[in-house]
Amino acid sequence: MPGNQCLRIQEVFSINFIFYFDFAVFSVFAMLFITEIMGSVMILIGWNKYRSGVLDYIVPVWEVTGTFAAFWVVASDFAFPNVLIPLANIFPGMIMLFLILFVARNSTIVFAEFIMKKGWLDERKLYSGYAISTLLIAVIVLIVLSGIIGGTGINLSSLSFSIGAWAVSAGGWLFLIGAVIIALGLAPVFYNVADMKKLTLPFTALGIVVSTVSLYFLSPGSFSSMVTIPIVMTILIPVLFMVQLLRKLVVNKLFFIGWGSIDLFTMNFMVYPNAFGNKFPVDPITTSGPLTGMYFVISSAGLIILTILIVFYAYAVRKKPLVA
C-alpha cells in the first residue's frame, strides 16, 4: 500500500517539462506568424492606406518568423522523435502545399524588397502575392491544428487524413472561421489603425464565440473551464485599445507579441495530456534519456539567439512613434 501510494503521488505531481517548453516555443512562433497574417489582411484591404505601417514591421521580421519556424521543427524532433514521420504520413498533401506556399511567400517578399520592379510587376503585386501566400499557409496550418486537436478527418489506424471528412465537420470549419474573425478584429490593434477602432471589439468578441464553440465540437473531452483564460486574455486586447490612456501600451508590438504568446500558451490543455480528440496520449511519445538534456541545450541556445534578433528589431524601431 505505501508503495502504491508513492506511485500515485508521483503520477499526480509529474510534469512533462519538455512538452510545456516545446509548446511555449510554438506559442512564440505562432504569435509571430499571426502578426504577419494580420499584416497580410491589412495589405489586401487597404494597400495605399496601410502600406507604410505594415511594411515597417513585416520587412525586418519575416525572416525571424521563418527562422523560428525552422528552429521549432528541429527542436520538436528532439522532443517527440517518433512523431514527425507519422505526422508526415498523415498530412503529406498539406505539407507539400505548405512548402510550395512557403517558397512563394519568401520569394515574393524578397523580390518586393530588393529587386527593381518594372512594368506590370510592381511593388503592390509582389506584396499582394506575399499576403495571399501567407493567408493560404494560415488556412493549411489551421486545418492541420484542428486535426491534431480534435482528430477531425484523421484515421490514426491507417495514418491518413481525409479533407472530405474534415470538410463535413462543423468543428473544423468553425475553428477556421473563428481564427479569421479574431485576426480581423486584432489586426487594427497591432498595426494601430485608428479609423478601424470601432470594429476591433465586436469582431474579436464574435471570433472568440465561434472559436470557443469550435473547440467544444473538436474535442469535448478536453474542453474545460480553463478556456476562460485565453478568452479573457484575448478580449482584453481590444478593450485596452479602446481606452486612450492604455492604448500606447497595447499597440506596443513587443507587448502585443508577449501577451499573445502567453495567451496561446494557455491553450495547451487542448492537446495535453491527450491529442487527436482526446485519443492519443502525449507523455509516452515524449523523449527521455540523453535526448532530454540535448533538447533543453539546443532549445535554450536557439531561444537566446532568437531573443537577440527580436531585441535588435526592438532597437531598430524604438524611435518610431507607437501611436498614430
Image (cartoon, helix red, strand yellow):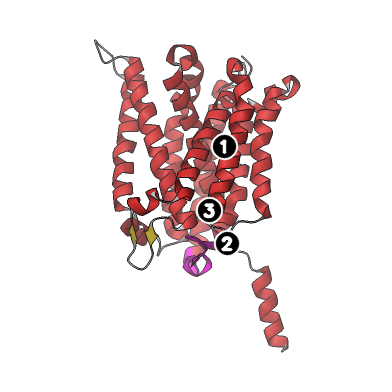
Which image quadrant: the N terminus? bottom right
| Residue 28 figure quarter | top right
Q: Of helix, strand and loop, which one carries label 2?
A: loop
**Residue 125 x, y percent position in the rendering:** 32, 18
Query: Compared to 291, does 186 lie above or below?
Result: above
151 left or right, relative to 244 = left
* Identity of the residue furthest to the bottom in this view: 1
Q: Is residue 13 magenta?
A: no
Q: Of helix, strand and loop, which one carries label 1?
A: helix
266 left or right, relative to 165 = right
Could you tell me if the residues under marks 1 and 3 are in contact, i.e. CB atoms within 8 Å?
A: no
**Residue 76 x, y percent position in the rendering:** 45, 55
Extent of the magenta region: 272-291
Q: Indicate which disc, 1 or 3, sits on the residue closer to the N terminus.
A: 1
| Residue 306 appears in the figure | no
Circle 1 is placed at which residue position? 207
- Residue drawn at (57%, 23%), measured in percent from left and top? 188
Circle 3 is placed at which residue position? 217
Q: Disc 2 versus disc 1: distance between alpha carbons?
A: 22 Å
Tell which of 64 and 138 is nearer to you. Answer: 138
Q: Amino acid at mark 1?
A: Gly
Give me the disc on residue 293.
none
Which image quadrant: the C terminus? top right
Circle 2 is placed at which residue position? 221
Q: Amino acid at mark 3?
A: Phe
Crowding near pointer 2: few (<14 within 10 Å), some, many (20+)? some
